[in-house]
């Protein structure tokens, strides 16, 4: 699959899974969760109204916690801790 086709595929898939959901909580991974992922640092977790959770990783293989950048003037980045 070419890059543009791949982007369109994933945009559609993510849209179906996430658009329209409401963020009901935000917290950092706890120590047990960090350990179970084999990570050394924690990242923010966004909990959605259907039980789905979303958190950033530094790559798509899950090799470490990731920062989340925003367009919010007072919160440009949600850091790894």
Image (cartoon, helix red, strand yellow):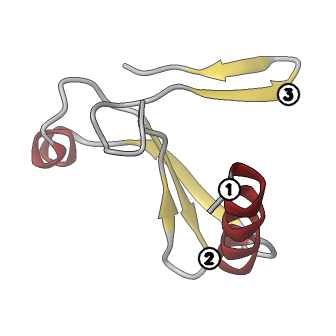
The disc, 1 or 2, on the residue closer to the chain's N-terminal end is 1
> Dot 2: what SS?
loop
Residue plotted at (75% across, 18% down) = 76
- Vertical comparison of 17 with 73: above or below: below
Residue under circle 1? 2
Q: Is residue 3 above or below residue 57?
A: below
Residue at the (82%, 17%) spot, across then down: 74
Q: Is residue 54 left or right of residue 60?
A: right
Measured as percent of width and height from the top left, residue 25 is found at 57, 57
Lower sequence index among marks 1 and 3: 1
Instruction: Identify the residue position indicated by label 3 in the image.
Output: 71
Mark 1 and mark 3: Cα distance apart in space:
29 Å
Q: Position of residue 54 (x, y in %)?
A: 51, 56
Query: Which label is found at residue 47?
Result: none
Distance from disc 3 to disc 2, alpha carbons, whole Å, reads: 23 Å
Q: Are marks 1 and 2 in contact (CB under 8 Å)?
A: no
Observer-nearest of 80 and 14: 14
Chain-order first, disc 3 or disc 2:
2
* Most foreground residue, 27 or 14: 14
Residue 55, percent from left and from top? 47, 47
**Relative side of 27 to 4, left or right:** left
């Amino acid at each position: 699959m070419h890059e543009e086709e791949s982007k369109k595929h994933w945009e559609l898939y993510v849209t179906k899974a996430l658009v329209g959901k409401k963020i009901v909580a935000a917290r950092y991974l706890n120590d047990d969760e960090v350990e179970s992922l084999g990570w050394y640092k924690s990242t923010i977790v966004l909990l959605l109204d259907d039980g789905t959770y979303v958190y950033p990783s530094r790559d798509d293989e899950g090799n470490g916690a990731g920062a989340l950048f925003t367009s919010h003037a007072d919160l440009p980045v949600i850091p790894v801790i």
